[in-house]
Amino acid sequence: MLQGPALPLIAWARRGRALTARLRPVCGRGLTGGVLSLLAYGLVVWAQARGNLATIAALRETSIVIAALIGTLVFRERFGHLRLAASATVLAGIAVLELAHP
């Protein structure tokens, strides 16, 4: 909670007035990302209050695998052994959650 107000103040202290000029071209994209992140978090909290927690947690964890795929397909990042192992671990966790809670 304290990180939100602190980071802009640190950035302003380090960059001064140059910060405004650097932020201007990407401000809309940053605000859009922030709003979408807040909406996604709210949607997860809403779903957890109304549904089966194990199923919702499993669905939420798929975002890690989707992010790895986006990184590989859109941003041309390597899908190496470490990312493959992490994705496999997440998918195994999802399977355990689903099998343990039919």
Image (tube, grey):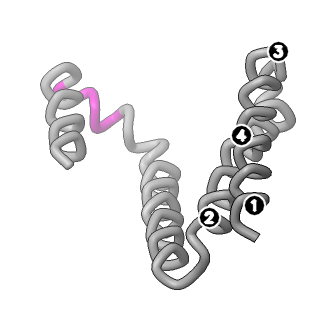
Q: Main secondary structure of the magenta part?
A: helix
The image shows a total of numbered marks equal to 4
Query: What secondary structure is found at the residue carrying circle 1?
Result: helix
Among the 4 quarters of the image, the one containing residue 86: top right
Check whether the beta carbons of the residues at disc 1 and disc 2 lie within 8 A of each other. yes
x 52%, y 84%: residue: 50
User: Where residue 94 appears, x then y in whole percent?
Assistant: 73, 51
Which of the two residues, 73 or 80, is positioned nearer the viewer here?
80
Alpha carbon separation for disc pair 3 and 1: 26 Å
Name the residue tied to disc 1: 98
Which of the two residues, 101 or 39, is positioned nearer the viewer here?
101
Earlier residue among tags 3 and 1: 3
Give the mark toward the camera: 3 or 2.
Answer: 2
Name the residue tied to disc 4: 90
Alpha carbon separation for disc pair 2 and 4: 14 Å
x 53%, y 65%: residue: 40
Magenta span? 16-21
Name the residue tied to disc 3: 81
Earlier residue among tags 1 and 4: 4
Screen quadrant of the C terminus: bottom right
Q: Amino acid at mark 1?
A: Glu
